[in-house]
Each structure stands twice: as structure tokens, then as C-alpha cells.
Image (cartoon, coloured by chain):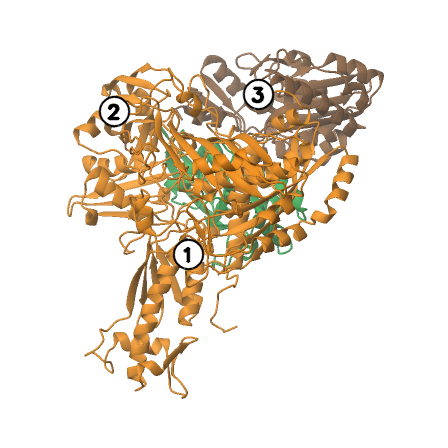
Chain colours: A orange, B green, C brown
Amino acid sequence: MSATNFIGQSVKRKEDYRFLTGEGTYTDDVVLPRQTHACFVRSPHAHAKIRKIAKDKALKAPGVVAIFTGEDIAAAKVGGLPCGWLITDVNGAPMKEPPHPVLAQGKVRYVGDHVAVVIAESIEQARDAADLLETDYEVLPAVVNASVARAQGAPVLHDIAPDNTCYVWGIGDKAAVDKAFASAHHVTTLEFVNNRLIPNAIEPRAANAQYSRSDESYTLYVANQNPHVERLLMTAFVLGLPEHKVRVVAPDVGGGFGSKIYLYAEDVVLTWAAKQVNRPVKWTAERAESFQSDAHGRDHVTRAELALDREGRFLGMRVMTTANVGAYLSTFASCVPTILYATLLAGQYTTPLIYCEVTAVFTNTAPVDAYRGAGRPEATYVVERLVETAAREMNLEPAEIRRRNFIRQFPYQTPVALQYDTGNYEATLAEAIQAADVAGFPGRKAEAAKRGKLRGLGYACYIEACGIAPSNIAGSLGARAGLFEAGEVRVHPTGKVTVFTGSHSHGQGHETTFAQVVASRLGIAVEDVDIVHGDTGKVLFGMGTYGSRSIAVGGTAIVKALDKIVAKGRKIAAHLLEASEADIEFTDGVFRVAGTDKQAPFAQVSLAAYVPHNYPLDKLEPGLNENAFYDPTNFTFPAGSYVCEVEVDPETGSTQIVNFTAVDDFGKIINPMIVEGQVHGGLVQGIGQALTEACVYDTDSGQLVTGSMQDYCVPRADDVPSFRIGTKETPCTHNPLGVKGCGEAGAIGSPAALINALTDALGVRDLEMPATPQRVWRAANKKAA
Amino acid sequence: MTVKVSMSVNGKPVSGEVEERTLLVSFIRETLRLTGTHVGCDTAQCGACTVVMDGRAVKSCNMLAMQAEGAELVTIEGIAEPDGTLHPMQEAFRQHHGLQCGFCTPGMVISAIDLLKNTPNPTEREIREQLDGNLCRCTGYHNIVKAIAAAAQTGGGVLRR
Amino acid sequence: MYSFKYQLAKSVADASAFVAKNSDAKLLAGGQSLIATMKLRLSQPSDLVDLGALAELRGIKVAGNTVTIGAMTRHAEVAASAEVKKAIPALASLAWSIGDRQVRNMGTIGGSVAHNDPAADYPSAVLALDATVTTNKRKIAADQFFKGMYETALEPGEIITSVSFPCPKRAAYMKFKNPASRYAIVGVFVADTGKAVRVAVTGAAPCVFRVAEMEKALSAKFAPESVASIAVPEKGLNSDLHAKADYRAHLITVMAKRAVAAAL
């Protein structure tokens, strides 16, 4: 390996020192001169008319600067929050898009809905004053459950959707699928809930907005995953501000998992209010507010069927899903249960015919949007629960039924729109089986039985589609945004490099991984490369970080810019070395004239670009700074095989994960240490979904029952095991790095593996997530809930 | 009403005039502007606000500043050597990739030092059980557990101050 | 948090006199429950009287057959105490299981016992070990102390100064934790005092309680199988998101059985 090839090396992270010493700068750490503090007054009711809001008492409270309500917002003609993806109903009509005001207009639709903002000198004063705001509500009946919301007589949230239905969407050839089922040897049917989750990044959402009268500009610091998208949506669709007058900075961000992709009401209100009060306004969510108002995840109710022939080959799949989108459409709410879900239902298999129908429903709950995996965990759960159950019903080994149906020829066109470029599913499964010591499982099961414990083993073979693209095809499917990424490489005169990326790191380690790519390509040290992200004032543009896209799309944009740097460098070197450009080679940071010992190191070339004395000024501009936009030609398709082994204490219902093996194919891996870390984190979020996490609303009152970490169980260290991790590499065929993405995989594959293991241990067919001790105890003892 | 509160933080005497209802974490973050101590959950679950008070790890978001009157505190800013050399626990987290977004990290590091102080040679099970006061949403704990186990061999349970 | 006035108590007598006079004033011990409640604006005391500086309320003494723990002694101190570990290992291990490590470094036995949270651990030990709660005014036997949810026999101005635990012949505490809050869904403390067996259950009902039938069976034969088929009636047990009453009832039997096994 070359001394300057850092691809595949576990380089320690450049960002760690500041995080380890408390020098990170998160949004709440930013305090601006003349700072004020905002407290949002939120709806205590799930559904109510606002009769009256009286500000007088609150305005008189100490320290109050201003109070704004929906009336003020309406008078100022502040727009509502837009949805970034138009889904077309099966009947050809566009989805129902009810207004999504940033402060409630006459009606509140979920507990935590934004009613007013109180701005004061200190946060405690703002909270004190908020308590004095008099709000008179007429409480209306509420509905929190999507299937109930569609029933006759259910409370109606929005006038434009009298049946509370946002859309009914379908994909696939229904008639052909029905025919396949009619002639099937065996049909496996499952009905289940994919439980609603609350993301709970440990850093709560936060924002701090500033306005300057001198140049009529705004600066918004915000805990966000994609600052340019935030700016574009806010300026173009909500506030109508000139985009060049708004700078959005997403500094260090303490985890996102999807929940910080979106344009939220608070961000808009603060930006608008900063001008009204002519002082910076800051808000940091209390955890209770995060629970109530961060976009939630999942919440599907599904009936799924798999048709098989005598040998266990899949003939067709039929899936009917009701997706709860909450009270309003969040930024990407509409595409998650459709485009990012149903297109993944082929999984790793050659199922020739698939039909999926999704009904999206408004309810009196927080908006639901993408949460780590976003549609793909739901799809994997459908496929892998069906496959495992079918194997058990047909007395086939669960691994064998998968092998009989694996896709082996690539590229492979699925019946649900995607074309997989590459993969080797057999290889990850074989390695997972070996690493998990599946052969020794019967012995371990027998030993556990002697101790009165139940052991079970479950598989999940997932497929993921990352780096959603290309823009024009997504556009034809309803996307209202581009799906490219941008990068800029600034080579300084001394050959040191600053790279600006539109991707955003909120834990993923871009500052290191991207630097490894740049250093390897330019043949310089990793320390000589700095990565800048998260600031629209510095970075040319960006679509940000979501859907495991950063390395595949953002990384490739940087590579494209690097290619331009090297191409220009070659021209400069040809001049310096008095050779033909065609004869210049660039390896290990040195430009050489092929077949000679004439050479110019990278730093010499960069210096020549900035001190252009001996330089072809007639043909070439000085300087060495290039940017690139990259719009991928296809998704990437990471895939993997997970094996989970559990031990259940049937007396208490406690589940212990005794072994969890994950073998993933992420294509080429830049930094194995970081990739493994991403897998670990994803696995625990998936395990959280399967074992501990449930968002529960009271079905009568619509109150959020799991409104704090006292009731919503984010997994702790002793809830989870250490993991056995492996990787296989089949490089992506359509990006220059051969990379696929790894951020969400763990969360996608693990719930199905875990529930397959638990149902195996308990000898039951169905088990609802999360499989809490109480549920497992009931299942183990066949007690009704 | 305000009250005067004084204590030692990272070896230096500090004081401030604060509202009586001021939480210790607010005093640290807002009055002293030591922003490495974080607030994550408000209900004393996440442990991002953990600091050392008189030699023991406590949750600074679940106590009043006045409860630390006269105490000796160490925050994450006081963990490394004055010359910037990382504490063995910090170094172990770096070596073993025990952090991602970094938000839980200050509390996690301080809590981990306290863990080793009380249990110098913990098993993996003991590490996991005794991390019950700290939540991390990024790492899945795998590498945090590895880092703490490694730091047990390198003096990770000893505070320099 | 609402505003309040803060004072550092100079003596138990001063603190007692102040809270007796000011009905909206509250005593602040470790604050691990109180501060959390105040942060949520669920509690609005006019004054907080901080007991943190009263050295006389801290410390562990073993005299004869009794372990006496000062009210302001922190859970971590009880858990780490060599004397407690030797005299009543079940009490040390219970203290070690409270909350989390940071909470144990702040929370106090007096605060926990006075607060009488339905899911707190200490009340089960106080009741099962037949401890005596000593206040600035009197001594209260465990059986007379816990009155109901968050209710105790303490009168206005009465301050716990210590809790005295007679050393049992054998004892153990088994807890099934709420996965989210880590409070007890069911905690069972079983103590064989030599003269009698006492079984106290926390977490399962609005207030800690004893299970007479189990005590009787264990007095006859101190063995897990003695309680294995004794079911506590569901009626009156807590029922929530995490555990319905029938599950709690079942767990009481399981935890009791396991506690007896651990005590043997």
C-alpha cells in the first residue's frame, strides 16, 4: 500500500479532541450579544379550537420582550411549512396538503402543537410568562390511531381531507400478483404494527436567530442536518426572504437520525421574530418538547402476504399498509412510507411480482417523518418476518429458504422500480452463519433449557437503497428538491487543503473519512486536509445528510472536484516540467513526466498556481480551487445478513440478546473503525425499536403517554450486547469510490432479526414490537394482553 | 431574588450572583460559560450533564447551584492535562471510537472515570450495568465499553485534580 | 422551575421550626426527586431548606445488632460501606441498585424514606427489616411509618434524623426494574429476623406493603418453594403502560422466590 493511501484505514477521528475536551460548539453553546430567549407555548390538547388568547398578563411579567401568536404570524403573511415530495393518489389526484402553520391558526391538532412564542430576557422569565398566557380552548374529540381515523364518524383534522386520508398510493401489478396468489402452493400471511418511535438524539433541537438591520441579513444557528435545504425552504416557501441574506449555520450537532432534517416551526418563528424584536432569539428544546414535537418515526399497520411454490420459491408478495403521518405533513413525510418503503419490498430476493398499497392518514399526533432507515426498516420487517415465518410453516431451514430465492444476477431489475447494481447475498449470509456459530445453536439451546431459559435464533437479510437519485427521476416521482451533492476543494498555496462539503456530520465523522479520501487522492497527509461543513456562508451548496448518502453522493462530489484539481495541476506541472500534458502522471502526491526522473511535488504545483511567475497565464487561470456538483445515476444498494440469538426468562419475560452478528456489504470501506461504529449505533436503535421503544398516545385523550425518558425507553448499555461485526465488499459500480453507505443499515436489519429470534424462542407466530418483558411474558405464558 | 454562590471549578475559585432557582448546570454553562457540560433530558436519565463534585460524579442538571456551594467541581474542561494532553479515559475513547456526535461524551467520560474509581477492574457486564446513568444514542455503547475496559489498564479511574 | 427562597439549614431545630411555620416550604435533602419535580413545574415550594450542611445527619453507625444510618447519608455511601456490607449485605446491595451511579452519589436515605415514592427501594428495606425511623421528635416503627402514596407519618416540621435497621439473620432484595425509569416495577425485600420473617413489596402498589401469607409460609419453612405458589391478589396493584396488575402480581411471587433463594 502506498504511504498516502488512507482508504481502508482506521484513522482516528480528527473531530474527537474537541468533543472529548468539551470544546465542541453545539447550537445551545452559542450566545449572541443582546441575546433573548424564547419559550414556545404548546397545545395541551390533542385537538381543540382556540377561542381566545389573552396576552396582557403575560406581557406584564418581568423580562418579557414580546409575545407572538398565530394571529401575528398570519398578519405578517408568514407562510406554512412545505412538504418536499408530492405523492399522487391511485386515483390520479395529488395528495392532500393541508396548511402547516408555524403557529396554530384557530385550531390545534396535536399535543405539543405550537400556539405562541414568549420571548424574554432569560429562559426562566420566558417560561414564567408563558404560564401567564391565557388560552381558551374548545376541546374537540381526537383520534390518534390511523385505522380509526379513516372510520366513519372519526374526528376530522383538516377540512380538505374529510376522511383524514392524505393519499392512497400503489405500486406494482395488482392483477398479476392476485393471479400468482391464486395458484400458489402456500401463502404466508402476517399482520403487524411497525411501532411509532421518537428519535431522541441526545442533543435536543435548538436554534438561535439573529437579524442585522445594517444589511437586512439573518443568521440562524440551528441543530440541523442540511442547512442549505433549511435555508432554501425557509426563504423560498415560508418567509419569502432573499436567500442571499440568510445564513444558516448548523454547527456541531449532537445526533440527528433524521429528526434534524426538517424545517420546523420553531426555526421559522425564531428567524422571523429576530427581526421583530431586533435582537437575537434563542430556543433550546426541553426534552419534553422533543418528545412532543420532533418528527416521530415509523407507525405503520400492515397486512402482508407471501405466495410460495412447493420448493419455497417466492411467487408474489402483497402488502397493504396504513401509515400514520401525524397531524401535518412534515418535510419529507409523504415519500417515506411510499418511495422509500414499497420499493424495497423485493429485499434480496427474486420475488417476481409485488403489489403494495399504502394509505397515509392524518391523526392528532406529532408529524411523522424519516427516522434512521426511513421506510427501509419497515420494508425489511415486512419481507424478513414473512420469509422466516414461511420457512417455519414449510419446514424449511430459514437460511435455506433465503438461499433458494437470492438474487444472483446483477444488474437486477426488481418489480418495484429499483435496479440493483451489485451484491453478493450468499456471501454475507454464509459469513454471518459462521460468525454466529449457528451450528452450535442446538447445543446452546439445550443448555439454556436446563436452566429454565428459552433460546431462539433469528435471521434478517436486508437490502437498503442509499443516496436517493437521480434528481430527474425522483422529480418525476414527485420530489420537489434536487438530490445531488456539492463539494469544493480549495488548495492553499502551500499545498494544504480545505474542503467544503454540502454533507453534514452530526456524529458520522466526515471530517476524518472525507479527509482520508482527499489525502489519498492528492497524495498528502490526512492532517493537511480540513473538512468544512454546516454553514451556508462557507459552503457553496448542499443537500445535507440523510439516507446514508454522505460518502456515496457527498464523497463523490468531492472526488469530482479533486479530479478537476488534478487535471489543472497536470497542466501546471506540464508547464513547470516543460513536458506535454499527456506525459504527466500523478501518483503519491507527485507529478512526474512519464519515463523520466523529472517531477514536481503537489505543493510546488499549488504554489505555482498562486505565485504564477513561471505559469501559462495565457492558457490557464491562476489559483487552485475547484468545485463540483454530483447527481448520481442510481441509488447504492448496501445489503447484509444479521443473525440474532436471544435467551428469554419465561418467568419474568426478560430478553437477553446473547449474540448479535452483523455482516454487511457496504461496498468499499474508507474507515473501518467509523463504519463499525455506525453499524453498532444502528443496531442498537433497531434493537430499541424491537425491544424497548414505543411511542404511546392515549387513545381517548390523545395525550402523549410516553412523554419523557421515564416512560420512553432509550436503550442503555446493559440492555444490549457487544456485537460481532463483519463486512464483505462488492464495490458499487456507479460511483468512483465504489462506496454504498452504512449509516442506517443496523437499524434496518436488526428489528426483524430480533423478533424472528424471539418468536423462535417462544414458539409463537406473532409478537408485537417492542417486545417488552410484559409482552414476552404474556407470549411465553399464552396470556391475553 | 439572587444569591451569591461560590465554589472551585477545575481548580479555580469561582463565584456568581444567581437566581436561587439556578441549576448547577446553568451556573456552569451560562455563568461560567463552560459549555462542555451538556443538557440532554431534563429528567436525570441521560447523564450528559455529569460533573465531578467533591470526588463523586453527579448530575448537574438535577441539583441547584446552591447545593454545590463551597464544593470542588471538575467539569470536562478540567479533565485533560493543562498542556492539553488527554486524560487516559479521553484517550481511550479516542483510540476505541467511543464517541460519535460528541454530545453525551463529556458526561460519559466523567462518569466512566468515576466508574473505574469505584470498580477498578470491571468486567464487561459491570461496565454495562454501571453505565446506567448515561445514555448514548450514537455508538450503541459497544466502543464505549471497550474504551472503559482499556482505560482500566491505563489509569483511567484517576482524576488528576 | 418556579422561583423560591433558598436557605441552608444551620440546625435541625431551625429547619424544623421554619418548615413548621411555613406550610409551603420544603426540606431539600439530596434533591434527586424534588428538583426533578420542580423542574417540571409540578411542585412550587415557597422556600427550600437545604439540609446538606448538617453533619450530624450523616454517617453510618453499627452498634450491637443495629445499623443506624444518618438521614443525609447518600445511597453510594451505604452501598460502599464495609460495615453495612458486613452487617446487612442486602441493604448495601439495595442501595447499590437505586437509580443510577450519579443519583446514588446525591440521593439520601432520609430523602427517599420521607418522599415515600411508590416505586422507591428503601421503603421495602425499612419495612421488611422492621427498622425504626428516628425524627427530631420521636421514633417511629416501620409498620407505622408508611401511610400511602407519598404519605408518611411525618408531621409538619418533623425531620428524619436517622433510620435504624436491626440486623437480620438473613435477607435479600430482588427488583424487577421499569426498563425506562429504572424504578422498581416490583421490588421484594425478604428478611428473616431470626424471630420472624417479613416480606415487603415496593413498586407494585401505591405504597410499600407486607405480604402476610408469604411471611407465614416462610416462617414455617424459609425456602423459595414456600412462596412459589402464593399469589398476591391483583386488586389494588398498580397498572400502567409497563406492567398491568396481573403481571405485577406475578412478578411479586417470582421476585419473592428469588429473594428467598438469594438470602439462603
Q: Which residue is mark 3?
A: C117
Dot 1 lies on which element? helix
- Cα separation, mark 2 vs mark 3, equals 41 Å
The chain containing the residue under callout 3 comes to: C
Q: Which mark is residue A244?
A: none
Residue A524 found in image quarter? bottom left
Q: CA distance from mark 1 to mark 2?
A: 42 Å
Query: What chain does mark 1 sit on?
Result: A
Residue furthest to the right in view is: C221
The answer as to whether the residues below labels 2 and 3 share one chain is no
Residue that badge 2 annotates: A105
Amino acid at dot 2: Gln
Distance from Cα at disc 1 to Cα at disc 3: 52 Å
> Percent x, y for residue A640?
55, 50
A570 or C226: which is nearer to us?
A570
Mark 2, Cα crowd under 10 Å, few <14 / some 14-19 / many 20+, is some
Looking at the rendering, which quadrant does residue A626 occupy? bottom left
Q: Which mark is residue A552?
A: 1
Q: Given the current orientation, which residue lies at the most extreme bottom position?
A: A596
Task: Say few, some or many: other residues with alpha carbon within 10 Å of mark 1 (under 14 / 14 to 19 / 20 or more).
Answer: many
Which residue is drawn at the image coordinates 35% and 64% (left, top)? Answer: A560
Residue A529 at least partly seen: yes
Image depth: mark 2 or mark 3 in front: 2
Q: Tell me: residue A461, above or below residue A561.
A: above
Residue sitting at 37 percent across and 64 percent down? A559
Chain of the residue on which disc 2 is drawn: A
Relative depth, front residue between A357 and C84: A357
